[in-house]
Image: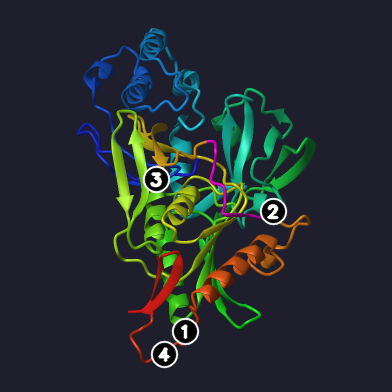
Amino acid sequence: MLNIEFPLLKKKKPFKKKFIFLSAVIFYGILVSDYSKASILNNNYKEVIDHVWQIVYRDFLDSNGKFERSAWIKIRKDFLVKQYSDSNEAYDAIRNMLSNLNDPYTRFLDPKEFNQMRIDTSGELTGVGIQIVKDKESDDLIIISPIEGTPAYEAGIKARDKILSIDNVSTKGMNIEDAVKLIRGERGTKVKLEILRNGNTFYKSLSRERIEIKTVISKINKTKDGLLIGYVRIKQFNANASKEMKDSLKDLEIKNVSGYVLDLRSNPGGLLESSIDISRQFIDKGIIVSTLSKDGLKETKRGNGKALTKKPLVVLVNEGSASASEIVSGAIRDNNRGKLVGKKTFGKGLVQSMRTLVDGSGLTVTVAKYLTPNGTDINKFGITPDIEVKMNTNPILQKEIGTRKDKQYRAGEKELIKIIKSSKLVSQFEPNSANIFSIFEKKENKFVYSLN
């Protein structure tokens, strides 16, 4: 499953926006360019095939440099000359057609899968709680990250685990859609995954569940020196994340925390608009993210001057921090807003747009790449943290995440304390004063704290 974003690209009139996602940008519309030709095709199923072909021809951004328009034109003729007896044949043809793009993020979803994706980004998840991508070079199905609180997370599934089989069916040559169909099923039933990790193979039996995910978890941690640290963990950038984050920050500001640890570990992404909104809650001014379309069109999103806090900030990241998580991390790092602690992030810097097709199915198509504020393309490379720290050798309990038993959190808290103390940021809370929100700036390599 992909994580998903917002309309960064200028929309051409043939498209009508309905709503949006991130694994990068996702919005919905119907392509009408040459649609009159498609509507008179002698096989109705060809309309969907041609619709997909048109979208790719016009909007696809090739990150591998291997896409040839002339070859794509020939592919159209090859697929439209055939007859299709039912939707399944047409859908298989579309997936076969898209396999020529060598892009794991451009993929077709039948109407059921498309509807499930909308549910997933709305704050409910059905299944075992993993997001997967297909590595075109190795042909492996790779887990981007398990989502915290789901059966996969509780079973110890990790980012970059490879799925070798599903219920004893080999995944060799299997596309993402077929894998998702096998993994999902009725609530309460189980699915057995064969996992490859660091050269070792093992099996995990996971229960299928429908889980309403609380996206943001926050609490106050008190240091040995008595400082109050606001700990905020974002599990996924779904439709509820921005509001939940805003509520958490307002509450923590009133309680007069001295700084924040933002935990984006194993967060596979979600709605890009959500990642933009959350970045703006920490960043007053400056670039949040930029995107480049295949035509060289650059769209930039900036802070809007409405940050909820400017107190010191440390961000925890790891190999499972992907897509929208990397947008937030990159924005904070490049704006010198905070320090990154943990391990290098996943490395997904491509933007997908989700399109509704003529029969209610959907297509996620790569339409742009995103750049961090400094103009860095992190796709396949990830973001290296300022302070690299491995996770605990022995797994810790879920309740111990974000505590001093958590090695990466401990390192993040230590760095945050150093920043707070060097800038003398400890202040007294005055409940009858309007000076609740603090301003945190960096001037001449020194942190300066003042009150509104």
Residue named by callout 2: 390
* Rendered view: 85 above or below 339: above
* Rendered view: 282 above or below 250: above
Q: Which is more toward the observer, 195 or 449?
A: 449
**Residue 153 coordinates in the image, percent (x, y):** 66, 52
Kind of residue at disc 1: Ser
Residue named by callout 3: 5
Nearer to us: label 4 or label 3 = 4
* Secondary structure mainly formed by the magenta segment: loop
Q: Give the Cα distance between marks 4 and 2.
A: 39 Å
Q: In which quarter of the image is residue 402?
A: bottom right
Which mark is first along the chain, 3 or 2?
3
**Callout 3 environment at 10 Å: few (<14), some (14 to 19), or many (20+)?**
many
Residue named by callout 4: 430
- Residue at position x 60%, y 64% in the image: 412
* Rendered view: 401 above or below 152: below
Q: Give the Cα distance between marks 1 and 2.
A: 33 Å
Q: Are marks 4 and 2 in contact (CB under 8 Å)?
A: no
Q: Give the Cα distance between marks 2 and 3.
A: 30 Å
Residue named by callout 1: 427
Kind of residue at disc 2: Lys
Query: Which residue is at the far bottom?
Result: 432
Nearer to us: label 3 or label 1 = 1
Secondary element at tag 3: loop
Kind of residue at disc 4: Glu
- Residue at position x 54%, y 48% in the image: 268
